[in-house]
Image (cartoon, rainbow, N blue to C red):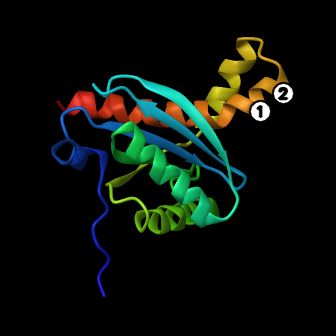
Amino acid sequence: MTKAPEITVEDLSPMLGHEARLLGLDVGTKTVGLALSDVSRFIATPYDTIRRTKFTEDAKTIAKIVEAQGVGALVIGLPINLDGTEGPRAQSTRAFARNLAAHVAKPIVFWDERLSTAAVQRQLIEADVTRKRRAELVDRMAAAYILQGALDRLRRLA
């Protein structure tokens, strides 16, 4: 059995409606950070953080957001190792995406998220954000960082 080819950001534009937003996800073991693009797909904004419970409940929450916000596709950060290989976290993220596809009938693409959380942490520290507040913000801001990278790539393709 051959595996279906993976959709890339480069493939995404023709699949999207005129004002369809993108939803960015930073999938962690305890939380899923969410970010939304504007309808012109120019800016990614931190949206929310889901505390992970049972997968079905998490998927329903994401599906409701997709419906309510007019999302046309999902961009999921893929935690690739610095040497370019995929480890257990990347495999777990791919499994999350495969399972989520059964609940959300929208294209799902992966975006290399190497060092996104570290970059966001650095920005928050530089902004003198307290440790407690950083913990509240980091997941959704990492999702925005991931989504912004994909949006910038889409814009360069246009």
Q: Name the one closer to the observer, 18 or 121.
A: 18
Counting from the top left corner in percent of width and height, residue 123 is at 66, 19
In the rendered image, which quarter is residue 39 located in? top left
Q: Specify whether 90 is left or right of 42.
A: right
**How crowded is the residue under tag 1: few (<14 C-alpha within 10 Å), some, or many (20+)?**
few
Q: Secondary structure at mark 1?
A: helix
Counting from the top left corner in percent of width and height, residue 19 is at 24, 32
Can see residue 105?
A: yes
Residue drawn 54% across the image and 63% down it? 96
Q: Are marks 1 and 2 in contact (CB under 8 Å)?
A: yes
> Which residue corresponds to mark 2?
132
Q: Name the one closer to the observer, 114 or 155.
A: 155
Q: Specify whether 12 is left or right of 139.
A: left
Asked if residue 33 is positioned above or below residue 158 in the image, the reply reads below
Q: Amino acid at mark 2?
A: Lys
Q: Secondary structure at mark 2?
A: helix
Counting from the top left corner in percent of width and height, residue 100 is at 47, 62
> Which residue corresponds to mark 1?
135
Farthest-out residue, top: 127
Q: Name the one closer to the observer, 147 or 66.
A: 66
Residue drawn 84% across the image and 27% down it? 132
Tell me the quarter of the image containing the C terminus.
Answer: top left
Counting from the top left corner in percent of width and height, residue 76 is at 47, 49
**How crowded is the residue under tag 2: few (<14 C-alpha within 10 Å), some, or many (20+)?**
few
